[in-house]
Image (tube, rainbow, N blue to C red):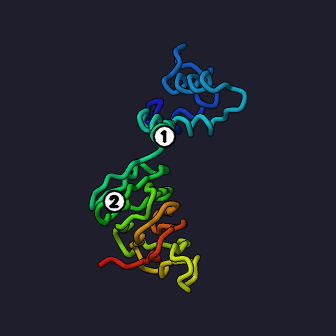
């Protein structure tokens, strides 16, 4: 069901091309929908293709409102051992608190266009870890994160890239993150692309499913 009601595009193509057509002096439902769209958006630039696309919108009013609501762009992840990310929260920033135990963050089933940001919201380094889990080695990570080592002067590199193996690593372990940690994920329908910065004394790691 579309936003403006279901209709047979082939049957009503001529009506959509000419919204003034009538059937025995009465506007058909398809024509009424087309004219409603024209009245809403103006008729100077709309084409038949534009009208067809608008009539094919299948998002609900609630989904459209949720996407447009800037007050709901942030998700506060609870202090818990597990958390399941919702597909409906794609595009939102997820804030993780200073945890009291390690957390496994289960990503939703893969779908093209899903994207999330995960930020550490504490003011001091967390003593706990995150495990960002795609759920399957088939849906592995591509890319990596930069590790900003807070053990200054320990003779190790202070900034190093950390990447997965690019063929099966489906878990990203963010270890004892500190302020400034941020991980961004984007899905192409099969794989998860990862980018970000992990601030802490211990470098993040990638792993396969157990």
- Residue 144, position as x, y percentages in the image: 53, 73
Task: Locate the N terminus by quadrant.
Answer: top left
- Asked whether disc 2 touches disc 1, contact meaning CB atoms under 8 Å apart, the reply is no
- Residue 129, placed above or below residue 55: below
Residue ID at (49%, 60%): 179
Classed neighbour count for the residue bearing mark 1: other residues with Cα under 10 Å, few (<14), some (14–19), many (≥20): some
Label ID, residue 67: 1
Residue ID at (58%, 82%): 157
Label ID, residue 202: none
- Residue 194, position as x, y percentages in the image: 51, 67
Q: Secondary structure at mark 2?
A: loop
Q: Secondary structure at mark 1?
A: helix
In the current view of this chain or complex, which residue is farthest to the top? 25
Asked whether 4 or 78 is in front, the reply is 78
Residue ID at (62%, 37%): 50
Q: Earlier in the sequence, mark 2 or mark 1?
A: 1
Asked whether 63 or 107 is in front, the reply is 107
Residue ID at (36%, 52%): 77
Asked whether 78 or 153 is in front, the reply is 153
Q: What residue sits right under mark 2 in the picture?
A: 99
Cα gap from disc 2 to disc 1, whole angstroms? 29 Å
- Residue 165, position as x, y percentages in the image: 48, 82
Q: State whether residue 121 appears in this view.
A: yes
Classed neighbour count for the residue bearing mark 2: other residues with Cα under 10 Å, few (<14), some (14–19), many (≥20): many
- Residue 18, placed above or below residue 110: above
- Residue 167, position as x, y percentages in the image: 46, 80
């Amino acid at each position: 069901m579309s936003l403006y009601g279901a209709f047979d595009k082939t049957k009503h193509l001529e009506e959509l091309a000419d919204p003034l057509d009538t059937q025995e002096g009465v506007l058909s439902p398809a024509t009424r929908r087309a004219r409603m769209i024209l009245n809403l958006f103006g008729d100077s630039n709309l084409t038949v293709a534009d009208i067809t696309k608008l009539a094919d919108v299948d998002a609900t009013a609630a989904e459209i409102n949720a996407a447009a609501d800037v007050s709901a762009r942030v998700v506060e992840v609870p202090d818990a051992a597990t958390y399941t990310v919702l597909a409906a929260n794609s595009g939102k920033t997820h804030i993780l608190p200073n945890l009291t135990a390690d957390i496994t963050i289960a990503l939703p089933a893969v779908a093209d266009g899903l994207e999330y940001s995960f930020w550490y919201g504490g003011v001091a380094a967390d003593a706990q870890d995150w495990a960002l889990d795609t759920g399957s080695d088939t849906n592995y990570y591509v890319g990596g994160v930069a590790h900003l080592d807070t053990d200054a002067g320990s003779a190790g590199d202070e900034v190093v890239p950390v990447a997965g193996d690019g063929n099966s690593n489906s878990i990203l372990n963010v270890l004892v993150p500190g302020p400034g940690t941020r991980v961004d994920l984007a899905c192409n329908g099969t794989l998860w692309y990862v980018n970000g910065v992990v601030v802490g004394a211990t470098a993040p790691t990638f792993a396969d499913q157990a």
